[in-house]
Amino acid sequence: MDNEAPSKDGRKLDHKTLEEIRMRAVRRVQEGESPEVVIASLGMSRACIYNWLAAYRAHGWDGLRAKPLLGRPGKLQARHIRWLYDAVTMKNPMQFKFPFALWTRSMIAELLRKKFGIRLSSTSVGRLLAQLGLTCQKPLFRAYQQNPTLVEQWLQREYPSIRAEARKCGADIYFGDEAGVRSDFRAGTTWAPVGQTPVVRTTGARFGINMISAISPRGKMRFMVVRGKIAATQFGDFLKRLMHGAKRKVFLIVDGHPMHKAKSVKRIVDSFDGKLRLFLLPPYSPELNPDELVWNDLKNHGVGKRIVHSIEHLENIVASHLRSLQRMPAKIRSFFCAKHTAYAA
């Protein structure tokens, strides 16, 4: 049986109050709140919010007056808007047999035409999305193999347990990761006359550098630059560097890459007699690792805007940028303030 509280009856409200409620609700949706959340907070029937959005779509703010304007009804009715909002926010375009996984205005226009026979221009679709509080954003990509249950378990139980144990025994928590950067990586823009694409001359040879780093919520950072591939041997060397001069126990959190579980790595961990412990993040969950933001900063603000002449030059650029980060604990702490890493702050 439904245990939801009964909805308020808008007919018992005076005209002025009802107008204010309608307008305030539509503004909240335009600011990014879910229509379902907005109407639930008002304690009114969920159908109301979509009727109001349809009225606003057809007649603007005047459509929300106690006595709406008469005239030709809009193309989109409440049921159309409700269905479209759910489709865009809860489903993938490929579920509707589109070839791509990201929504575009033209795809949404095509979806409306196929589903309801309603034709809207891309510009009109853009206005509609804005009215629904939807904005064009760069998405986060997650592996389809990721197990949400394991992620939730990590956030709710495993990491809080690690943090509690670290506090109890006075250990420092670090998040570690490996990455590589190539000489042909580019980021950013530059200025040029209209219609004339700027050209930046760089070396035609391609080469790369690999790196390992670890950062702590306290703003500490350790790193190692490697020419060639990173395997268990190199990771073991990094662990020795990480522990060199360490006065407190270290809890290092890394992903489940096989090299992190290699026998040689286990021997090195054991050699520190409990002073070093390794913990593994949930599989396919890089967004949970604040150390990923080190590589983002390096690539976009260090290497991406530089002209690289040789592998020695690239190595110097990488090491110099990472040393600069070491001297900025506040910036390192900020990597623990992102949406998906704040849990570790």
Image (cartoon, rainbow, N blue to C red):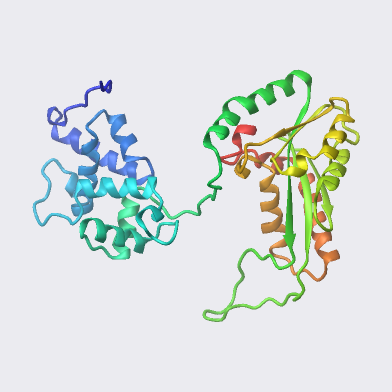
Q: Quadrant of residue 33?
A: top left
In the drawing, does residue 296 fall left or right of residue 197?
right
Residue at image x 31%, y 43%?
27
Task: Name the one closer to the observer, 53 or 230.
Answer: 230
Q: How many marks?
A: 0
In the drawing, does residue 316 fall left or right of residue 87?
right
Percent position (x, y) of residue 139? 50, 52
Task: Name the one closer to the observer, 175 or 135.
Answer: 175
Q: Does residue 176 sit above or below 297 in this rendering?
A: above
* Residue 20 in sight in this render: no
In the drawing, does residue 24 fall left or right of residue 153?
left
Residue sitting at the far bottom: 196
In the drawing, does residue 242 fall left or right of residue 132?
right
Q: Does residue 128 sit above or below 214 in this rendering?
A: below
For the N terminus, give its image quadrant.
top left
Q: Quadrant of residue 318?
A: bottom right
For the C terminus, give its image quadrant.
top right
